[in-house]
Amino acid sequence: MYLEIVSPEATLFSSEVDSVAVPGINGEFQMLNGHAPIVSLLKEGIVKIHTHTQSHLELDDLHGRVVPHNDDDKILTVSINSGTIEMKDNKVIVLAD
């Protein structure tokens, strides 16, 4: 599935991913390929991006907000204050503050 994370300043992330976990207002939830369409509000927390491999990503171009997870370089994390997420047709868009 394709993931875009957009902030008011810039596009923070845009790539194919295996899954994404987000801090929903009613708790963390994860979306995989083929997930049903959804729109949800997000609260302050960490967005966890599970990639195929980190080697194809240029983290220097991602404004320093997307960082590799300490234990697994195939997991990237982004801290957000709040936001909105939409998934439809295997495309996920996170509008993050």
Image (cartoon, grey):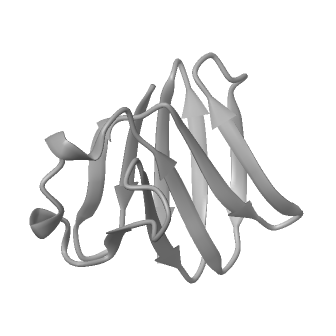
- In the image, farthest residue toward the front: 71
> Would residue 41 appear left or right of 14 to someone viewing this image?
right
Quadrant showing the N terminus: top left
Expressed as whole percent of the image width and height from the top left, the position of residue 84 reads 60, 59
Splitting the image into 4 quarters, where does residue 60 fall?
bottom left
Expressed as whole percent of the image width and height from the top left, the position of residue 59 reads 18, 62
What's the residue at 70%, 75% (across, down)?
43
Splitting the image into 4 quarters, where does residue 14 fall?
top left
> Would residue 3 appear left or right of 43 to someone viewing this image?
left
Q: Is 87 in front, or is 60?
A: 60
What's the residue at 81%, 67% (across, down)?
25
What's the residue at 65%, 81% (across, down)?
44
> Would residue 60 appear left or right of 24 to someone viewing this image?
left
32 relative to 73, above or below: above
Expressed as whole percent of the image width and height from the top left, the position of residue 52 reads 37, 32
- In the image, farthest residue toward the right: 26
Q: Is 87 in front, or is 35?
A: 35
What's the residue at 46%, 71% (across, down)?
70
Tally the numbered discs. Answer: 0
94 relative to 42, above or below: above
Splitting the image into 4 quarters, where does residue 53 fall?
top left
> Would residue 60 appear left or right of 74 to someone viewing this image?
left
